[in-house]
Amino acid sequence: SSNDNDLYWKHMGKQIQKHQGEFKRNKLTSEKDSGDWEKYVDKDRGIGPIVDYTTHHYTYPKVMMELPNDSSYPPFESLGAVIKKWSQFSLNTPPSTIVETIQHFDFQDPAQMDAAKKFRNSELPFKVINVPELKQAEKKWTDDYLSWHFDRKEINLSLPMSASKKKKFEKYGKMPISHGSCQKS
């Protein structure tokens, strides 16, 4: 009913105000994060992420070639422990080292791929790394390449083209226009 809907939105408004107040009260840990919470609401859209996770430092678990006999994998951590390491109020300042706990198997190593199959068959989570097709896509799919294919307008080949647009057209070719958008990192 409309009365229930009104009550719901009234409740949601109070929840939003509560979280805004909590955000303002928390001391943020980074210069980037200092200031009022309003600065961060929808301001970063289209600009890209503040943290570049492709260059961040990670540690990885030792490769497990056999399945564990107990229920120790995957390791579980409470939400409280996760937030102690990385506060919800400073998302733009992750820990200096992100500790991965999920197994990583090298696609180029047959023994590791056998281990990955055991994990898959046991329905345990893992990641496969060093996949040649993905490495090629990583080289090709730059921010510039993705922006060209997602953010550009339809090109009319009968009209003159700027030098930079012509260079990109020659480099990336003509593909059907996408109706998405690209967020540069």
Image: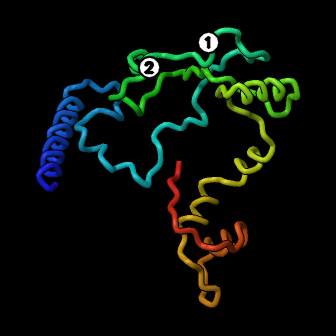
Would residue 42 be found to the left or right of residue 20 on screen?
right
Q: Which mark is residue 82?
A: 2
Q: How far across and how far down the image is residue 62, in percent?
A: 71, 15
Secondary structure, mark 1, is loop
Q: Quadrant of residue 125?
A: top right
Q: Is residue 68 left or right of residue 65?
A: left
Image quarter for residue 79? top left
Q: Which residue matches tag 1?
A: 71
Q: Earlier in the sequence, mark 1 or mark 2?
A: 1
Q: What residue is shown at x 56% (from left), y 35% (from top)?
A: 53
* Residue 112 to residue 39: above or below: above
Q: 164 or 146: which is nearer to us?
A: 146
Which residue lies most toward the bottom here?
158
Q: Residue, x 36% and y 35% (percent of image)?
A: 32
Point out the residue furthest to the front here.
1
Q: Nearer the viewer, residue 21 or 158?
A: 21
Q: Amino acid at mark 2?
A: Val
Q: Is residue 77 above or below residue 174?
A: above
